[in-house]
Image (cartoon, rainbow, N blue to C red):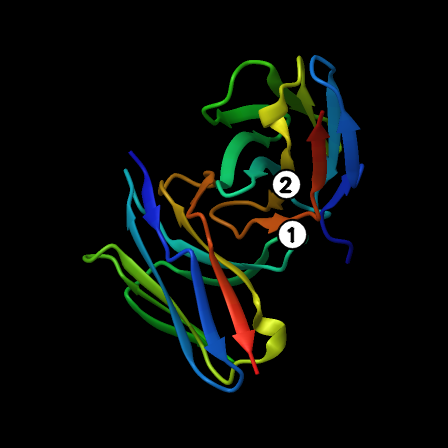
Amino acid sequence: GQNIDQPTEMTATEGAIVQINCTYQTSGFNGLFWYQQHAGEAPTFLSYNVLDGLEEKGRFSSFLSRSKGYSYLLLKELQMKDSASYLCAVVRSNSGNTPLVFGKGTRLSVIA
Amino acid sequence: EAGVTQSPTHLIKTRGQQVTLRCSPISGHTSVYWYQQALGLGLQFLLWYDEGEERNRGNFPPRFSGRQFPNYSSELNVNALELEDSALYLCASSGLGLDTQYFGPGTRLTVL
């Protein structure tokens, strides 16, 4: 089966750093996406990891460990506009485009 | 460049009715994916179309169907609506190979 786990909710302070974890157990793996979704809006692409290690992109970084079935999204210098849901999604197959399997998302609240 | 577009934005139907949702992918993208995002459940994969063909289908009953047109736009049809079909329906598109999926703004369907 497919199982992707993320914390349901997190709260962090403006200017701080927050780490959102994602663990997965899927039949086949060919990469992991992180998306940001503000309430009532479409998910927007943040990052894609297929190899182990850390990918840094401005204030956002994403880490992957394939052997542990684990990823995290790191948000630095938090801003109020970062309040959103963060979705972890796994690409199951290595045979071209395949549907993403999503976790339920982590709702992040940034407070002053 | 225009992103993924969906119509309508909101829709209210009653049980037993039928609904058609529409999606236009990003120019140059040939794959279209449909997801259902019900409250508290995360994104659930519905259907994947590529080059006019249905490539994969999620764990949904046959009353969920769709098609892709020669211009790569797509329709999602839901027959015999049930209350639990109330959700945000998201369409995403991607290009060739293992490519990032970009989401449209979604259609909010309410079934009364």
Q: Position of residue A63 (x, y in %)?
A: 34, 68
Q: Residue at x 46, y 71 (%)?
A: A11
Question: Which quarter of the rendering shows the C terminus of chain B?
Answer: top right
Q: Residue at x 78, y 54 (%)?
A: B2
**Residue B7 visible in this rendered orientation of the protein:** no
Quarter of the view holding residue B96: top right
Is residue A47 placed above or below A12 in the rendered structure? Answer: above
Which disc, if any, is residue A42? 1
* Drawn side of residue A93 relative to residue A86, left or right: left
Is residue B76 placed above or below A11 in the rendered structure? Answer: above
Alpha-carbon span between mark 1 and mark 2? 7 Å
**Residue A69 visible in this rendered orientation of the protein:** yes
Amino acid type indicated by mark 2? Leu
Q: Nearer the viewer, residue B110 or B18?
A: B110
Q: Position of residue B1 (x, y in %)?
A: 77, 58
Element type at marker 1? loop
Quarter of the view holding residue A45: bottom right
Which disc, if any, is residue B90? 2
Amino acid type indicated by mark 1? Ala
Q: Nearer the viewer, residue B89 or B5?
A: B89
* Drawn side of residue B103 relative to residue A108, left or right: right
Q: Residues within 10 Å of mark 2 (few under 14, many from 20)?
A: many
Residues at badges 1 and 2 in contact (C-beta under 8 Å)?
yes
